[in-house]
Image (spheres, grey):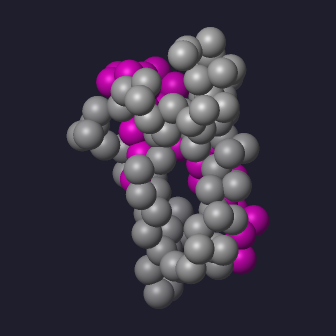
Amino acid sequence: MDEELRESILGALEQVIDPELGIDIVNLGLVYDLDLDEEGKLTVTMTLTAMGCPLAGIIVDQVQTALRDLPEVKDTEVNIVWNPPWSKDRLSRYAKIALGIS
């Protein structure tokens, strides 16, 4: 996938807000990898801030909805992983400021 398409996908994913923290999943550092195959199936490998998050299903649905309007993406699979574990080190500068973390 080219850089322009990758940026479009990440831009769409910035519309997915973690309901507990109020910040998008990209700036939280929850998106680990994006893989688009020849048929247009996008696999989003991501994690959540806490194992057993009760809102996981909602976030997965929001990811799929956010990517629906991109013509290159025909289907989306969300792969939730726990390794490597998420930590505050993955937060963007924006997220750190918004959460008051230095």
Quadrant in the rendering for residue 85: top left
In this orientation, which residue lies closer to the viewer: 51 or 34? 34
Quadrant in the rendering for residue 62: top right
Q: Is 97 drawn above or below residue 62 in the view shown?
A: above
Residue 59 in view (yes/no):
no
Report the quarter where the C terminus lies. top right
Q: Residue furthest top?
A: 100
The image position of residue 59, as x and y in percent, is 56, 37
The residues colored magenta run 45-71
Residue at 24% over, 40% down:
83
Instruction: Find out whether residue 84 is within the magenta segment.
Output: no
Q: Is residue 17 left or right of residue 92?
A: right
The image position of residue 36, as x and y in percent, is 48, 74
In this orientation, which residue lies closer to the viewer: 13 or 87? 87
In this orientation, which residue lies closer to the viewer: 30 or 3? 3
Residue at 52% over, 79% down:
1
Q: Is 61 drawn above or below residue 55 in the view shown?
A: below
